[in-house]
Amino acid sequence: MNCVKHLAFAIAAWAITAAAYAASTFVHPGALDSRGELDFVKAKIQAKAQPWRAEFDRLVASSYATRTPHGKTTINSSSGDAELSRDDAIASYTQALLWYYSGNAIYANRSIAILNSWTNLQSFTAGSDQDKLQAGWIGAVFAPAAEIMRGYSGWTTNDMALLQAMFKRAFYPQLNRMSTWNGNVDLTQIDAMMAIAVFNEDTTEFNAGLTRLAKRLPSYIYLTSAGTPPPIAGDGGNVQNFWFSPTLWTDGLTQETCRDNGHHTQFALGSALHAAETAWHQGVDVYTANTRRFTEALELMASQFLSGSMQGTSANDVPSASRFESWEVGYNHYHHRAGLPMTKTGTLIENQIRPNAQRAVWNLVHETLTHANLPASVSPLGGALPPVLTGSKMLPSGAYQLAFTNNTGATFTVLSSTNLSLPLTHWTVVGTPTNNGSGLFLFTTEPLTDETERFYRVKSP
């Protein structure tokens, strides 16, 4: 009887916990950068390994490493406010990275000083879609900075709450209304939506970003097999004109390829891949369903840049000379995680992006430092997903054992109570499950010696 009681009630409590976890838990840090990725790069910097050490030294020497706050109560996106807020956003992220990698509290305090200086921002005031773009550009950088800094003990919960409230007050109105300008603007908005949603722990905003991304991608990246791109607000009902009159429709062509031969497409793809990366860190795989779209677009543009020819897609055959930090996130996923060759993209990164690309342009910031050559093991899908129970039994010793599967990088705590209705804060922590390294977690209690009904649940982190 003792064994039956323990087994039945443990399974019931498990199901309740899993359902609650799926609805409300975010992994931190979990916007553009995960803890595993940050720790990997930190170790490489300490070992003076390349390219990470050179990129770190570049950050230390940059003006962003010493920039002080310039927070305002309004942003006119058509004025000098645009560059001022951009540079503060990039500086806050730069200093957050420098703090994490070096442990130097001077950088931490500078980063949070900048973030705190913007908590009184009320609105964007240009009155056009330029406000939507500006909110996307800087929101997509401020939020990843805040995600890293939430791990710093010197940043108070009250100041974090003020920043979260500011994002809702000033940024949500600009981000949640889709721009009908070219697709790079919507994708930049989505990048910011996803990153801010993680910092704000806002499931509704996060899911709204995912929905927008799913709608925009087929209308931005062309695949022959999918046929005519679906209509989207702003296209004027004329796909040929909206796509700037391609002379060849081929796999990987984007809505802005023929606009300026790769300049704005780098912003669009970089933003879309940032959103996919943020989703990945939260356990949502956007990459797999969009493998062909993303890889064809990256490989086509890389081929054009490497060859110096638009390869028949555009009336102007000369590719843009712009090179931005748009490439490492996508290449890291599809090459290092998924094992795809991505030969042209890899060659472009080695020969043109790492040697020559600007390191901080609007929301395309420091990708070589944060995402170059990351092994798949440091960034599994999400931190933790709803756990899947695979075993639950009483052992001959009288101990209770449960087994479940999850992402290999997830961490869990096991709690126990004799009263299922108690709030989680009143449950007792009884230990942590072991992780066999392949996603199987196992927890075994001490031998249970009485007839008391007992419940178990897990939480992450």
Image (tube, rainbow, N blue to C red):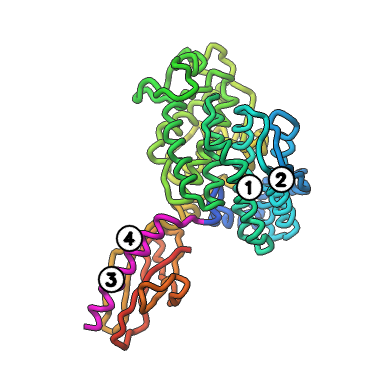
Residue drawn at x 70%, y 56% as measured from the top left: 108
Circle 1 Cα neighbour tier, 10 Å, few/some/many (<14 / 14–19 / ≥20): some
Q: Tell me which numbered mark, 1 or 2, is placed earlier along the sequence.
A: 2
Q: In terms of secondary structure, where does tag 4 sit?
A: strand
Does residue 234 show up magenta in the picture? Answer: no
Circle 4 Cα neighbour tier, 10 Å, few/some/many (<14 / 14–19 / ≥20): some
Image quadrant holding the N terminus, namely bottom left
Circle 3 Cα neighbour tier, 10 Å, few/some/many (<14 / 14–19 / ≥20): some
Write down the residue under mark 2: 91
Q: In terms of secondary structure, where does tag 1 sit?
A: helix
The reply to whether callout 3 and callout 2 are in contact (CB within 8 Å) is: no
Write down the residue under mark 4: 388
Q: In terms of secondary structure, where does tag 2 sit?
A: helix
Q: In terms of secondary structure, where does tag 3 sit?
A: strand
Q: Disc 1 marks which amino acid?
A: Met
Q: Is residue 312 visible?
A: no
Dominant secondary-structure state across the stretch colored magenta = helix
Write down the residue under mark 3: 392
Q: Disc 3 marks which amino acid?
A: Ser
The picture places residue 443, in percent across and down from the top left corner, at: 37, 72
Q: Tell me which numbered mark, 4 or 1, is placed earlier along the sequence.
A: 1
Residue drawn at x 56%, y 35% as measured from the top left: 188
Write down the residue under mark 1: 166
Q: CA distance from mark 3 to mark 1?
A: 46 Å
Residue drawn at x 44%, y 72% as measured from the top left: 432
Does residue 12 show up magenta in the picture? Answer: yes
